[in-house]
Amino acid sequence: MSQPTLNIVIAGGSLGGLIFGIGLQAAGNIVTIFERRPNSAMLGLGAGLSCAPEMQEFMAKYDLTKEPYSLDTNEYQFINSKDEMIRHANMEQRSTTWDVLYYRLRANFDGLRVGYCSVPDFSGRRKGVYRDGCTVTGVKEIGEGVRVEYRDENGSEKSMDVDLLIAADGPSSRIRDIFLPEMERRFIHIAWRGTVPLKDISAESQAKQRNIPTLCLIENSATILYPIPGANGSLDPKDQLYNWVWYRVISQDSPEYKEIMTDKDGKLHRVSVPLGKMQPLVVLKQKTLAGQLLSPSSAEIVQKTKDPYIQAITDCISPKTLFLDGKVLLAGDAVASLRPMAGLGVNSAARSAMMLLDALEGRMTLAEWEKDILAYARDARAMGITRESTWKMKKASDVKEEGPPAGFRTKVNKI
């Protein structure tokens, strides 16, 4: 029995919103995405990310371009501050960038053509609608559906009546705030990020990093480094970049935190300092610290990065995902702000999107979907905390049983 066509609005046009949009659109529904930022602001800074099994499954099913989008490896290593490999894992990892994935998803959702990939043929199927600069401001239940109130790209207040509203508007979800105003994000630690051209890294450091995902653990700090596609998603070795993320434990009340989160124009930021806005002295201090704390190869990669940037890592998990009898639901980071050390990222969105299709098509109930999504989020949060504890309290040489990030199928070998 065919399912009725639903008219759906998704608030949030980043990766999570697009993942839900593509799956729901492929099932024959009418999908409109509202993204509050203008298109020019939807840039991922070339940040690297990993696609775990569920995201790989999603891309295999829904990426109609069928073009490669990642650098693939079957290895992972732990090194200490002396660049000595102390542990090794056999596992599959697909590394790509935010930009590559965003534009690949846009090509599949609404046919956006920007040069990162080809655009699939939309003959015989409906394109999604993606609207930049539109912010959802309110939700009202009306009979069997909901009225979505929003401010459009011209600043006009408008509304749209739909069957379903999906809030994929991030860890500071405005829609979640409507239903759960008491929820707050809790600061955990900071993450420095950056990329550097692979060709700029010395042969000695490349030999130590082995061009595979590498985790350098030191006390109260961890750095993960791995190659990613280059400009416009190029997989050519001469164009590839080295992506790194350096997690550091500092107090939110410390003078150091205030200095780090204040940009070169004197503005204090709450969550992140944009690319190109870091104070030069702050960047210099961090690069100097890298030389003192990190392994030589890891330090070189950090120090050769021209424009590093900073993010505050926060913790937030919703007690529920369904509202107004299932006419409004939370998705992705609006459900839980999963710690990066859990290694899940977009995997969580892909998993919950595919399960939502099962619920809408009658293979499970929405209540069962909610129960599973929340259990998964709680488990992922606990896993992230466990992995963080290994570098908050230990050095890499002390690690005994901790494997690589969650969400990967692994076989660990001790060195």
Image (cartoon, helix red, strand yellow):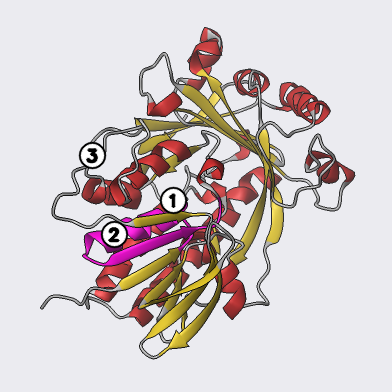
Residue 342 x/y as whole percent: 51, 51
Element carrying mark 3: loop
**How many angstroms separate mark 1 from mark 2 (CA)?**
12 Å
Q: Residue furthest right?
A: 255
- Return the disc, 1 or 2, that comes first in the chain's sequence: 1
Boundaries of the magenta span? 11-37
Q: Is residue 25 magenta?
A: yes
401 displayed left or right of 364: right
Residue at mark 2: 23
- Return the disc, 3 or 2, that comes first in the chain's sequence: 2
Q: Is residue 16 magenta?
A: yes
- Return the disc, 3 or 1, that comes first in the chain's sequence: 1
Residue at mark 3: 65
Residue 272 x/y as whole percent: 68, 46
Residue at image point 18% right, 44% down: 121
Q: Is there any visible trace of residue 230 in the rendered image?
A: no
Q: Is residue 187 above or below residue 43?
A: below
226 displayed left or right of 69: right
Looking at the rendered structure, the kind of residue marked 2 is Gly
Looking at the rendered structure, the kind of residue marked 3 is Thr
